[in-house]
Amino acid sequence: MKIGIIGAGNIGGNLTRRLTTLGHDVSVANSRGPETLTALTAETGATAVTVQEAARGAEVVVVTIPLKNVPDLPAGLFDGAADGFAVLDTGNYYPRERDGRIDAIEDGGLTESRWTELQIGHPVVKAFNGTYAQDILDRPLPAGDPERLALPVAGDDAAAKEKVRLLIDELGFDTVDAGGIDDSWRQQPGTPVYGLREGVDSVKKALDEASPERTEAFRG
């Protein structure tokens, strides 16, 4: 599968490492330009590209950048992506630590990923936002292993969500359907499932126990 990754930080870099190991054709981009990705591409065999080129031909496009930078993504970003492509959003809103206050999230009632959809003009599937980046490398297990970790996955497009869930399964993790993007507050920072390293049953329980009220630490 051809996969474009926008963002080469902890999550983006480790997804690049794992997905290339699995044989996928990965293009990776960051805000500083392809020339800054030579170490990662030498290690993995991925192709370094500009952000504008990252989605070209891609069946899955991973957006894994700070939320505050999402509006700066280039217009026409998804021109040339494969038919039926899915956008995987790993983002979180950290108003105090990084992103500043975003009124549409704080006051407008938008979930983080719904806000992201509005900025990029395309539906997203939310996953990996509460995953420890090192677990992507260290904790994949085969299907059926009782120690296999599960990830919540939210999205409105059933086909896109299934594509992402199959990819996560290939990466070595179970998934739990966390509902649509308007339900994705259940996996935002400060909720019981955020950072949870457990299996399917525990993830389902944590999603059920979530409160829509954003915790004080994650308010602007």
Image (tube, rainbow, N blue to C red):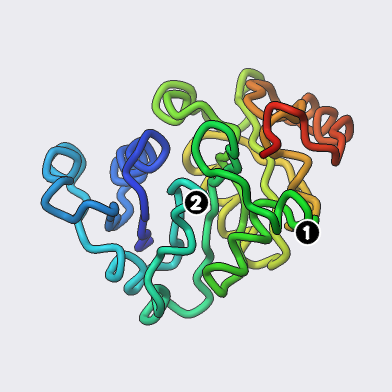
Say above or below: 79 vs 210: below
- As helix, strand or loop, the secondary structure at mark 1 comes to loop
Where is 156 relative to 23, above or below? below
Residue 144 in the image: state x and y as whole percent. 64, 29
The local crowd at label 2, few if under 14, some if 14 to 19, many if 20 or more residues have their Cα within 10 Å, is some
Amino acid type at image mark 1: Gly
Crowding at dot 1, Cα within 10 Å, few <14 / some 14-19 / many 20+, comes out as few
Tell me the quarter of the picture where residue 214 sits: top right
Foreground residue among 1 and 145: 1
Q: Which mark is residue 108?
A: 1
Q: Determine the CA span between mark 1 and mark 2.
A: 17 Å
Given contact means CB atoms under 8 Å apart, are the residues at marks 1 and 2 in contact?
no
In front here: 129 or 169?
A: 129
Determine whether, in the image, residue 63 is placed left or right of residue 27: right
Above or below, 117 against 63 in this view is below
Which residue is located at x 33 percent, y 53 percent?
Answer: 24
| Residue 220 pos. (x, y %) | 66, 39
User: In the rendering, which numbered label is found on residue 68?
Assistant: 2
